[in-house]
Amino acid sequence: MAKESLELIAQRKTEIMDACEILYRIKGFREVTIKDISTETSFSRPSIYNYFETKEEIFLALLTREYERWTEKLIKVSFGGPWNRDEFAQALARTLENQDTMLKIQTMNLYEIEENSREERLMEYKRAFYRAMTAIDDCLEAYRPGIEDTEKRDFRYVFSPFLYGIYAYAHPTEKQLSVMEQVGIPSAQMTIYELAYHCIRQLLPES
């Protein structure tokens, strides 16, 4: 690969991730291929391998970017307040609106993606995840100044695993809905925002 500027490398990675995200919206994870991604971009398939070794690394980079976007929203919340419990739950839940790609990847495909990505790429994602968790702590500080570290930890220990299932709960498949109806299980029929709001409100200590 010819010597490239960091800016050019970033632009090309962005184009590849954008193409992957478009395909992911209309195809399942396993159906998206490097060849498909090359068709959506200006790069040949061999050229893509100059930037990502596997398809999973592209998805991991996409997930990392989505966490960075979410963190930007969380930081804005952390500078807000004062809040009552409802107001804060609403503000924090709204940060998850338009984060479907992030929630879908980590709900449906994260284990396989991590297994097929290099450690250095995985570390980039984990750093982005950690920054998001730190931003959540800052949000909780804005909600209740002086909140104990144990209370912030307890919130994260429940809220983080919740994030790994919320997408599937908000977007059941037609087959799942059909089976649930036959078995007699009522569908929640709630948006990601609504699910997040109810979870956050229940987890919050009093302000």
Image (cartoon, helix red, strand yellow):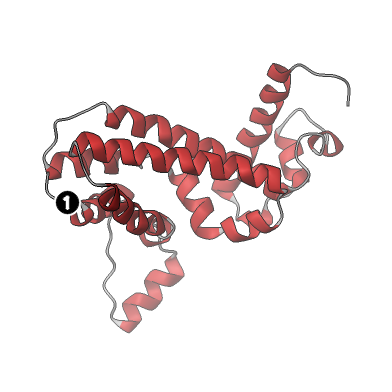
Is residue 161 visible to the viewer in this orientation of the structure?
A: yes
Q: How many marks?
A: 1
Characterize the local packing of mark 1: few (<14), some (14-19) or many (20 or more) Cα atoms within 10 angstroms: some
Image quarter for residue 138?
A: top left
Is residue 63 visible to the viewer in this orientation of the structure?
A: no
Residue position marked by numbered label 1 in the rendering: 205
Label 1: element kind: loop
x 48%, y 45%: residue: 102
Looking at the picture, how far across and down is residue 155, in whole percent?
A: 29, 53
Q: Nearer the viewer, residue 25 or 162?
A: 162
The image shows residue 14, relative to residue 91, as above or below, that is: above
x 13%, y 44%: residue: 86
x 33%, y 59%: residue: 158
**Which quadrant does the C terminus fall into?**
top left
User: What amino acid type is highlighted by mark number 1?
Assistant: Pro
Image quarter for residue 141?
A: top left
Q: Nearer the viewer, residue 173 or 157?
A: 157
> Is 17 on the left or on the right of 51, as rendered?
left
